Amino acid sequence: EGREDLQVNQLESQIWIKPDIQKTDVEFSEILNAIQEIAKDVNIFFDELEGVNSPSKDDDSLLHHGNLTSTSDDASRLEVVGEEVPDKNKINGLYFRDGKCRIDYILVYRKSNSQTEKREVFERNIRAEGLQMEKESSLTNSDIIFVKLHAPWEVLGKYAELMNVRMPFRRKIYYLHRRYKFMNRIEKQISRFRGWLPRKPMKLDKETLPDLEENDCYTAPFSQQRIHHFIIHNKDTFFNNATRSRIVHHILQRVKYEEGKNKIGLNRLLSNGSYEAAFPLHEGSYRSKNSIRTHGAENHRHLLYECWASWGVWYKYQPLDLVRRYFGEKIGLYFAWLGWYTGMLFPAAFIGLFVFLYGVTTLNHCQVSKEVCQATDIIMCPICDKYCPFMRLSDSCIYAKVTHLFDNGATVFFAVFMAVWATVFLEFWKRRRAVIAYDWDLIDWEEEEEEIRPQFEAKYSKKERMNPISGKPEPYQAFADKCSRLIVSASGIFFMICVVIAAVFGIVIYRVVTVSTFAAFKWALIRNNSQVATTGTAVCINFCIIMLLNVLYEKVALFLTNLEQPRTESEWENSFTLKMFLFQFVNLNSSTFYIAFFLGRFTGHPGAYLRLINRWRLEECHPSGCLIDLCMQMGIIMVLKQTWNNFMELGYPLIQNWWTRRKLRQEYGTQRQTSFPQWEKDYNLQPMNAYGLFDEYLEMILQFGFTTIFVAAFPLAPLLALLNNIIEIRLDAYKFVTQWRRPLASRAKDIGIWYGILEGIGILSVITNAFVIAVTSDFIPRLVYAYKYGPCAGQGEAGQKCMVGYVNASLSVFLVSDFENRSEPTSNGSEFSGSPLKYCR
């Protein structure tokens, strides 16, 4: 063991300078022996021998800092970069004052804060763990102090081994079975043919910018005893910046700041105000005076901005490997899911657009629309009491045509297609996630045992029990206490759902009252379109109520979740997620459910109208049907909500950051502002949302529900969602790269609880679309008429010629003299025929 340790130390001292030629020869011989052994089997190997000892793409030395040069070996690459730090990095504030120690983490506090003793103990223990520290005063506020932390190689190696950080140790070698030999030859020919074709416009240029993806290497948990097996060309860049900051954060979460078993961790110091902020640094500026194609990327942030967050690359695929390398697997998985969802929207949007265009092309051939437009002699009864006049059925011609655009023969096919699409989307995402998990080494990754939340410890620290896994005492919540808290929380959820129903009830009353008001309006345009005006204003008011209630729901969900006292952060996050989704889903869709399944269903008939509180007559559908109301509801809500969300996601941080820069320019001037160190610039950026990716996922999940649940009534919903998501990807990317502080690079295996919510929405969408076709649309009544009562009855046909007379057959006759006194219109209808009407339809 002593000789082995000596050999390892010698390797550690030598491997940073240049590759060991003799060791490389040994590796080649080992690989060739392995190939010969496996070649005895019936398998064929394919290997790129020149890349066996290729460097890891986690190595920042692969970034170009000068003119683009093609280097074939690793030694030349090391000669270009070496271990000397560029002077611009010293100026930009990425290193300590010595220009050699890279800043891995920043802590911020105010000198006026009273928690001085806790900070001193905490920082003393940080140094005891091996971290190096420097302090700097803010250039804009002398009260603000920045604590710069650097993890030396020894600390990184120690904790990387404890955390089982997987690092590359050899390029992957693939082999195929002989039965795939023929298919492999075909693939080679196809690849040659593709080489003659123009470069694919949607793919990023990975030849000019090789840092966009990682080399395919085998990885293994890092071990200092087996350090000679790993691909190490520069010890300062072997662990990338995201991994370094994650290791430092891991250390900070386990350092004590006071005596006592619970007085531990950075999160508690942030919550009690000892530190104001804590974040890893961005890798410099995201802009450069030089072109990225001629001078290369200044850093990974600059590369992400040019190839991902820039609007000029909106049509290109996302560089997910680079996103994962810079922001971590958790954020990388979000953008992978968002990109997959957006890609899957293309067929849904295309089919939805086809259904809409089919309605446009068949508009002049629709027998029902023709009969409505030609029915000048059919007089309809008033749709409200007193002030609503009699009207010709032909006055509904425009609405009948608009209804046909969305409710036509292709609508049923589209509803079935979307039900299948939702299932296929989820199943294919499983496959895509499995591929990503394999590529990013997430298959065997298990989340570390979570720490108990400080709030849980403070509440139940007096009562402890032995943890059966760790064997350590921990706070314990009694079953009765937990049940009582869950009951109170469930009661709060039920109460808030009742608030939503009350809001919908208020909208119903508004629609009932204002339809009469608009019918008596002095402007002819509004008076003649009173029902459309009522629907439009009701939708806008409903949108305002939705946005106001969302603010209230967030506070209520936060209160109820804290009341439950979840034990760990993941339990807290799952509980909060379920509440917020339930609140916002009900808030967003309750009025839509009312219009789809209740509007005009319980109004009664002339002479015996059903009334609300025995006063207001319930609202009726337009003579052309209720589907036009549902389309307006979905279209207006979807457009307004997505516009508002995009503004709040990007516009609000932009305004805040602009205001901060404006104040700095006024006080220090433009030149002084640009010379601020990186930690000062990052501190002036907005911190990432307190709930992490929660808001991003929630917005997309609600959109997914809006796109699938009532898609039979609004086939253009997938197209609107697609256009929004194309913008959303670049907005989120721009926000992460330019407007937010760099978040901690966290790991995750999947999208978590959101997948189960997506499955529930998929099941609900099948049911609701079936009911929309059966109840809201006229598809079934038209089929019944065509097969049983129309001109083609008994012939098994259902074409347009079979719909002749459908409109007249669907209308009943009512004597005007039978109107109730409070329902009798002020007009007697003499303007239609010169004499009072005797009946209406």
Image (cartoon, rainbow, N blue to C red):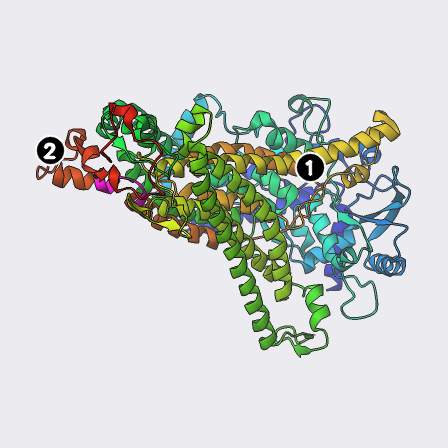
Whole-percent x, y for residue 841 in the image:
24, 36
Report the quarter where the N terminus lies. Answer: bottom right
Q: Which sits in the foreground, 390 or 393?
A: 390
Residue 131: in sight, yes or no? yes
Across and down, in percent, residue 214 comes to: 59, 39
Query: On the image, numbered disc 2 is attached to which residue?
Result: 791
Question: Pointer 2: residues within 10 angstroms few (<14), some, or many (20+)?
Answer: some
Decide: is 639 above or below 545. above
Measure the C-alpha gap from mark 1 to mark 2.
Answer: 64 Å
> Are discs 1 and 2 less than 8 Å apart at CB?
no
Q: Is residue 119 above or below residue 176?
A: below
* Magenta part of the chain: 775-781
Q: Position of 824 compared to 458: left or right?
A: left
- The first of marks 1 and 2 along the sequence is 1
Q: What amino acid type should be assigned to the residue bearing mark 1?
A: Pro
In this view, 709 is above or below 576: above
Quadrant of res 102:
top right
- Residue at 64%, 33% in the rendered image: 304
Q: Quadrant of residue 2?
A: bottom right
Please tell me which residue is depicted at 8% across the width and 37% down the height of the picture. Answer: 795
Is residue 510 rendered to the left or right of residue 596? right
Is 50 included in the stretch rendered in magenta?
Answer: no
Which residue shows up at 61% across the image and 66% down it?
Answer: 564
> Would residue 170 be seen by someone viewing this image from the given angle?
no
Q: Which residue is mark 1?
A: 653
Residue sitting at x 68%, y 67%: 456
Q: Is residue 242 left or right of residue 714?
A: right
The kind of residue tagged 2 is: Pro
Quick one: 654 or 680, which is closer to the camera? 654
